[in-house]
Amino acid sequence: MTEVHFPELGRRHPARGVLVCWLVADGSRVRVGDRLAEVRVGGDCCGRTVGWVSALATGTLWHQVRPGEVLTAGVVVGLID
């Protein structure tokens, strides 16, 4: 099983952010490099950086967090089985 982690998008950004939405449904098959979720990190609502969580393995994706959750960089947001 491969863990999918919330990213840290550079040193200038805080280590916290929000998982905005999943781009792949829970229980769906994914391949290495697929974009799995959209995330936002950074300061106020106007200055946020948008990024993505990508698959590092091929298999079935299982969500571990819900959209809108405030997360710390490195936390497990999904599992690929």
Image: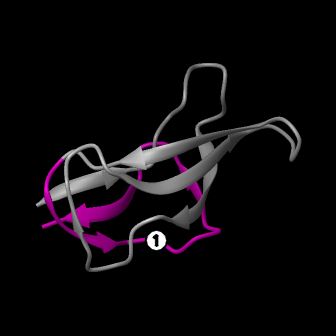
Instruction: Tell me the residue at 34%/78% (across/down).
Output: 26
Residue 59 in the figure: left or right of residue 36: left
Rendered position, 15 above or below 13: below
Q: Residues within 10 Å of mark 1 (few under 14, many from 20)?
A: some
Residue 11 in the figure: left or right of residue 58: right
> Residue 50: horizontal and vertical position, in percent?
64, 41
Instruction: Tell me the residue at 89%/41% (across/down).
Output: 46
Question: Residue 79 is drawn in which quadrant?
Answer: bottom left
Q: Nearer the viewer, residue 63 or 52?
A: 52
Instruction: Tell me the residue at 66%/20% (across/down).
Output: 12
Residue type, numbered disc 1: Val
Residue corresponding to mark 1: 65
> Residue 22: horizontal and vertical position, in percent?
49, 67
> How many discs mark residues in the rendered view?
1
Q: What is the quadrant of the N terminus in the image?
A: bottom left
70 inside magenta stretch: yes
Question: Residue 31 is drawn in which quadrant?
Answer: bottom left
Rendered position, 11 above or below 31: above
Circle 1 sits in a helix, a strand or a loop, which is it? loop
> Residue 68: horizontal and vertical position, in percent?
65, 68
Q: What is the quadrant of the C terminus in the image?
A: bottom left
Q: Nearer the viewer, residue 2 or 32?
A: 32
Outermost residue to the top: 11
Look at the image and give the residue range highlighted in magenta. 57-81
> Residue 56: horizontal and vertical position, in percent?
22, 45
65 inside magenta stretch: yes
Outermost residue to the bottom: 27
Residue 44 in the figure: left or right of residue 4: right
Instruction: Tell me the residue at 57%/66% (across/down).
Output: 21
